[in-house]
Amino acid sequence: MATKVTRMQRVPTVVRELAAWARVQSAPLVLLPLGAVLVWVAVWRVWLPSPGTAVPSRRSVTLAIVLLILGVSSVVIGIFHDRLRRIELTRTGLTVTLTGPEKVGLGSLVEQLAQQGASPEKVAEAARRFLEAVQTTRPSPVVKTALAPGVKDGLTEEQAAALAGRIAAEVG
C-alpha cells in the first residue's frame, strides 16, 4: 500500500516537471518542426519536378527560396532561443540581461580594475570575459527544471565575486 501512495505522490511531481520543461522549451518544440515542414515543402513540393516527369518544375523559384529562408530561420531561432532572450541589440547598443548578483560581480570587476589603473582596453576585455563566463556557467533551462528545480537563474553572489576576482587578477 505504501508503494502505491509513493507512486501517486510522485506522478504530480513528474507532470509538473514535464509541464515546466515544455514551457521552457516551447519555442524549439514549435519552431523546429515548423522549420522542417517549410524546408520539406520548399524542396520536395515546390523546387523538385513532379514524380514521373523529367521536366523541371515550373513552380515559383522565389516561393521555394522564401520557404527555405523561413524554414532555416525558424530552426535557427528554435535552437538559439535561450541566448536570444538574454541578449538584445537596440539602436542604443547591446543589452545583456544579468541577474542582481551578476551585476554586482561585474561592477566589482570594473571597480577592481579601476583601482589597479587598468587601461580601457583591459577593462573592456575583462568585461567581455566576465560576460562570456557568465553565459557558459549559467545552468540551462532543461537542467533547472528537470534535474534541479530549486536552482536559481544565474550565478550566486559568491560565484560572481569569485569570477570577478579571478578575471581581475588575470587581466590586471
Image: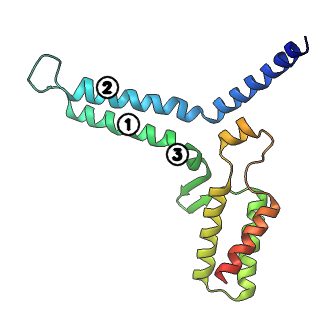
Q: Is residue 126 above or below residue 25?
A: below
Residue 67: x and y in percent read: 32, 33
Q: Which residue is drawn at 60% across and 63% down?
A: 132
Distance of mark 3 from mark 2, alpha carbons?
23 Å
Q: Residue at x 74, y 61 (%)?
A: 102
Q: Which colour scheme is used?
A: rainbow
CB atoms of marks 3 and 1 within 8 Å:
no
Question: Between disc 1 and disc 2, whose residue precedes?
Answer: 2
Q: Point out the frontmost of discs 1 and 2.
A: 2
Residue 128: x and y in percent read: 59, 69
Residue 130: x and y in percent read: 65, 67
142 left or right, relative to 64: right
Which residue sits furthest top? 1
Q: In which quarter of the image is residue 150?
A: top right
Q: What element carries label 3?
A: loop
Disc 3 residue crowd, few under 14, some 14–19, many 20+, Cα 10 Å: few
Q: What element carries label 1?
A: helix
Could you tell me the amino acid type at mark 1?
A: Leu
Q: Point out the frontmost of discs 3 and 1.
A: 3
Q: In this view, does 11 lie above or below 141?
A: above
Q: Which of 135 and 11 is in front in this view?
A: 11
Q: How many labels does the image show?
A: 3
Could you tell me the amino acid type at mark 3?
A: Phe
Q: Which mark is residue 70?
A: 1
Dot 3 corresponds to which residue?
80
Q: Residue at x 77, y 38 (%)?
A: 149
Which residue sits furthest right? 2
Dot 2 corresponds to which residue?
41
Disc 2 residue crowd, few under 14, some 14–19, many 20+, Cα 10 Å: some
163 left or right, relative to 48: right
Residue 41: x and y in percent read: 31, 26
